[in-house]
Amino acid sequence: MKYRLTVVEDNAADLFLLKDVLGRIGISFEIDSFSDGEKARTYIQQGEAPRPDLFLFDLNLPFIGGLELLQLLSHEPRFAGLPVLVWSSAQSKQDLAAIAEFPAVEFIPKPMDLGGFLQIGHKIHEMLQYR
Amino acid sequence: MLEFFKNLLDTDFMPHGHCYYWRSEIVGLHVISDGLTALAYFLIPFALVHLARKRKDLSFNWIFWLFGAFILACGTTHLMAIWTLWHPVYRLEGLIKAITALASIPTAVMLLRLVPQAVALPSQAQLREANQALELEVTERRAAEESLARLNSDLETRITESKADLERSNQDLQRRTNEVEALLTHAPIGFAFFDRDHRYTRINHVLCEINGLPESAHLGRVMSEVLPVNRSTDPILAEVFQTGRAVEREVAGETPKAPGVTRYWWAGFFPIQERDQPVSGAGVFVLEITDRKRTEHSMALLSAIVSSSEDAILSKDLGGVITSWNRGAESLFGYSAAEAIGRNVTMLIPEERLGEETDFLERLNQGQHVNHFETVRKRKDGTVLHISLTLSPLVDTNGKIMGGSKIARDISNRVKNREALKAVNRDLRIANEDLSQFAFAAAHDLREPLRNVRAYTEFLTELYSEDPDQKIQWAKTVIAEGVQRMDDLLSGLLDYTRLGGSEQEIFVGVDVSLAVQGALRNLEQMIETSSAQIAFGALPVVPGNEHNYVQLFQNLIGNAIKYRGTETPRITICAEAKGRDWLFSVRDNGIGIAQEYHGRIFGVFKRLHGKEIPGTGIGLAICQKIVERYRGRIWVESELGKGAKFLFTIPALASEVADRNERK
C-alpha cells in the first residue's frame, strides 16, 4: 500500500535524504511537503486536503514554529489519532517539555549522518505499520 | 615611943587655959581667933581643890593640892589649940603639928622651886592682852579659814570643771581621731604619711591597692625603694619638705599593680608641721584618674572624629530640637552650627516627608534604631539632596532616652550612580539575553549546515563507490573530522550559553561525591586508557543541581588526565570548610600551566595547545561559569611541569553555616 506523509521542513537537503532512505527501505509513499509554517497552517486549517498517515514537523520553521503547528493540529478533529513525529537539530528543555504535553507526538533529534537517517526511516516505517 | 602613941589621948597635963588663968577675955580671944582661923583654913583648901579640879588647864595645879593639904593641916592645929584650952592632949596636938610641918616643908620647897616658873606665868593683864590678841588672831584665823574654805570649794569646783573639760577634749580628740581613721579607711582616695626622712609611716588600703603592694612593703621605706618603676613623685615630696608648701599635681606612671601600663593620678603632697617649726613630716593624697583620662582621651578622639567627619552628625532631643551640629552637617545642609542648634530638625525635611520625623521620634522613644534609611532632605538654599540616615537613641547614664543622634550621609552621587547602574544593568541584561539567544541561534544554525555536510559527504561517497586509490575515502575522513571538530565547538558553545542561569532554579542539596562518581563514569574510557588513579575523600553536600557539578568535575578531571605528563596521572579531589564556603581542589601531577597563562585559561576558546591534545577551549570557561553561578570563585595554582591544582569555592548550605557558627 502507499502511505501518505505530510512533512513540514524548510531544509530541502534533509527532505531529500529522508525521501532517499524511505525509498531504500522500500516503503511506498507519497509526500505533501511545506517549506514554512505559514503554508503548513493553511494546509491544516483549510480542511480540504486528504488525511495523511503521518505528520513530520521540524521545530524550527520560518513564520510559524513546529510547536504552534502541533497546537493547531490538536484543534482539528479530523487529524485526531494521527501519529506525529517532530524532529529538530537543536532543542531547548522548554521545547521538549512542550512536546511532552502532546501524548501522540514523538520527538527525534535530527540525524547527524546517513546512518541516522536510515534509523529514522525505519522508525517511520514502524509507526506506519503499527499505528 | 610606943608609950607615946598609947597615951596619945591622955590628959595628964594641965589645960592650956590655966596659962591664961582662965581669964575669960584671953581664953575667949584665943578661942574665937583660933576658931575663925581654923574655919578660914578649912575653907581655903576647898576653894583650892575646887579650883584645881575645875581648872585642869592650870599649870602646876598639883601645888594647889599641896597647899590645900598644908592649910587643912594648919587649920587643924588651930582647932587643936582651942581643944587644948580645956583638954590637955598635947601629944595629939604635937603630932598634928608635926604632920602640919611635914606638909609645910615640901610645900614650901615645892613652892620655892616653883617661884621662877610662877614668875614666868603671865599676869592677868598680860593674859587679857594675850587673850585679846588671841581673840583677834582667832578671828583673823577664822576669816582666813573661811576664805580658805571658799578657796577650797572654788578650787574643787574648778578642778571638777577642768576635769569635765579634759574629758570633753579627750572625747573630742577621740571623735576627731575616729573621723580621720574613717576617712582614711573609707575615702576612695589613697593616703600616705611620711616622716622627715621621707619614709612611709602610714598608708591606707586605697593607696596600697593603687601601688599594687601590701602595707608592709611601704612602712619604713622611701618611695624610690617602694616604687622604683615610678619616680615621678620623688621630687614633689622633696619640694614639699624644702618649701613647706603643699603641691598638687597630675602625675603619670606605672606601678607594680599593672606593669607596663601608664596610669594617671591626681596627687597632692602637703607638709605636716607645728607653727613656726620646721616640716616634721608630709602626707599625700592620691586620686586615681586613669579611667577619667582614658575617657577624656577617647572623648577627645571621638569628638575629633565627629567634628572632622564628612558625614553630617547631629543630635536632637525628644522634641526634635537640634542639640549638636558638626562641620559635616554644616557643609551638607548649609546651616552653621549657630543657626541650626536650637531649631527643630523639621527645617531640613521637605513637607511631603514630615511624617518621617514623627515616625523617627516614636521609634526613638521606644529605644529603636533606624539604619541606613534613604530619604531626601533640603538644604538651607532649598535644594534637595539624597541622604542615608542612621538614627540611634541617646541614653543618659540612668538609661533614660534623652534624644537621638543622626548620621546623615550624602548619597546623591550614589543614588545617581545607582540609577545609572540600574540602566546599565538593564541594558546589559538585554544585551546578555540577546547574546545568549544569538549564541544559541548561531550554534544551532551553524550546526544545521554541518549535518548536511556530513550526511551528504557520506551520501556522495556512497554514490562514488568506485574508489581504487581510496582518495574519496580520504577526502571523506578529512571532511568528517572537520565537521566533528566544528560540531564539538558548537555543542560546547551551546552548553556554555545554556549555563546562562537566567532560569530561576531552586538549588537543592547536591552530594558532591555522587557528582564526582557521575563524572568518573562519564570519563570511564579515558581513565581506563590512561590508567589514571583518582582519589577523593569525604565530600560535602552543597547547593546547586547535580548536572552542573558532574560537568564541573568531569571537565576538571578530564583536563587533569588530558594534560598528563609522562607519569601515570594521579588526581586528588579534596574539600575543606573555609569560613562560609567550601573550598574544593582537584590536584594532578600533569604538565602544569605557566604562571603567565593562569588568567587566560578560563576564557572561552582559550587553548594553550594545538591539535596534539584535543579540546575545544571551552571546558574551563564552563567550569568558571558553573562556579560563578553559585557565587563561588575558581582559580589555579600551578607551575609549568609541576602539576596543577584547580581550586574553587562554593558557598555552604545555610544550615551548614549556622552549624559552623555554633561550633565557634
Image: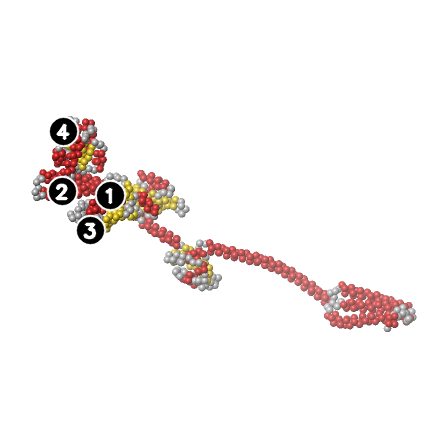
Q: Where residue B488 appears, x then y in whole percent?
A: 17, 43
Disc 3 from disc 4: Cα separation: 63 Å
Name the disc covering residue B565, or none: 3
Image mark 1: chain: B
SS at mark 3 in the image: loop
Kind of residue indicated by mark 1: Gly
**Image quarter of the N terminus of chain B:** bottom right
Same-chain status of marks 2 and 3: yes
SS at mark 2 in the image: helix
- Front tag of 4 and 2: 4
Q: Residues within 10 Å of mark 1 (few under 14, many from 20)?
A: some
Image mark 3: chain: B
Q: Which residue is mark 2?
A: B480
Q: Hey, which residue is sitting farthest bottom in the picture? A: B1
Disc 2 from disc 3: Cα separation: 30 Å
Disc 3 from disc 1: Cα separation: 25 Å
Disc 4 from disc 2: Cα separation: 38 Å
Q: Which residue is mark 4?
A: A1
